[in-house]
Amino acid sequence: MQCSLINQLSKVVTFTIFVFAVLYQKSLALTCYDNTGKDNEMRLVSNDDWTFCSLIPDAPFNKNTPGKVYGLGAANDDLAPYLLAFENNDANYAVLSVCIFERYDLRTFSPKFQVPENLFRCVCNYDKCNSRTSFEHYLDRLADKSAKKQSKNWKSLPFCLDDCSYCCSCLSFLKHISKRQDFSYVWLFTGKSGILAPRSSLI
């Protein structure tokens, strides 16, 4: 009788520990919006292997993969540049998102790629932060009420040099540099602000 009671208590304790372990694991998991399934339906997915949520905005320069959102982990990308950027956060300053504009030339890997492809994408690092598929709404979603005005102003600030200095909006700037043959650009930091400039203008 006593042995049976001990066994029952042992099962209850084991089950309780298991439940708490599952709940703890879920609390560590990052939850991101994801529409990369076969049906392209928007879903909320939690995964403890993800470090960031990612967005490929629905924009003209993302012709091949517009409006994609998904989770990002070490298994599907090099996270080092993103981790470095988010390490700058402190009590008075926070990186809300890191965006990169890339060009991939995959013609040497497969004949189905006829021309180099451009890709603009952003990452953020808290639950459901990639809820919007358009770039402007994404920025508004990231910014809280007190920072919203600053977020909108950022899109109209000049942040380029040399022959692209006339491109003062974010979207027109990206369209401009995507047409350049020399697409080696660098991000220059001055304190906690930066400018994106052609590498050739710095030589």
Image (cartoon, rainbow, N blue to C red):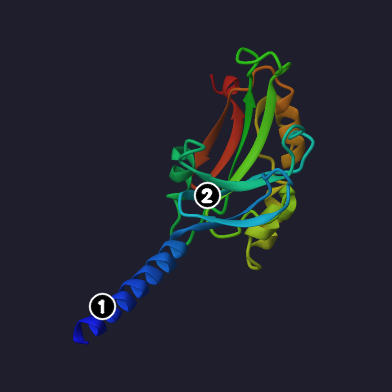
Q: Nearer the viewer, residue 56 or 27?
A: 27
Q: Quadrant of residue 201?
A: top right
Q: Nearer the viewer, residue 201 or 35?
A: 35
- Above or below, 107 against 165 in this view is above
Q: Are marks 1 and 2 in contact (CB under 8 Å)?
A: no
Q: Residue at x 52, y 54 (%)?
A: 125
Q: Nearer the viewer, residue 200 or 100?
A: 100
| Residue type at numbered disc 2 | Phe
Q: Nearer the viewer, residue 90 or 57?
A: 57
Q: Residue at x 45, y 45 (%)?
A: 83
Q: Residue 115 location, x and y as percent?
A: 72, 17
Q: Residue 150 location, x and y as percent?
A: 66, 57
- The residue sitting at the front extreme is 1
Q: Residue at x 22, y 87 (%)?
A: 1
| Residue type at numbered disc 1 | Asn
Q: Quadrant of residue 43?
A: bottom right
**Seen in the image, is 186 located left or right of residue 48?**
right
- The residue sitting at the right extreme is 60
Label 1 or label 2, whichever comes before in sequence order: 1
Residue topped by disc 1? 7
Q: CA distance from mark 1 to mark 2?
A: 43 Å
Q: Residue 11 location, x and y as percent?
A: 31, 75
- Above or below, 173 against 191 in this view is above
Instruction: Tell me, yes or no, if residue 91 can be seen here.
Output: no
Q: Residue 16 location, x and y as percent?
A: 36, 75
Which label was assigned to residue 181?
A: none
**Seen in the image, is 45 located left or right of residue 190?**
right
Instruction: Tell me, yes or no, if residue 44 can be seen here.
Output: yes
Q: Residue at x 69, y 25 (%)?
A: 117
Residue topped by disc 2? 52
Instruction: Classify 10 Å Cα crowding around label 2: few (below 14), some (14-19), many (20 and above).
Output: many
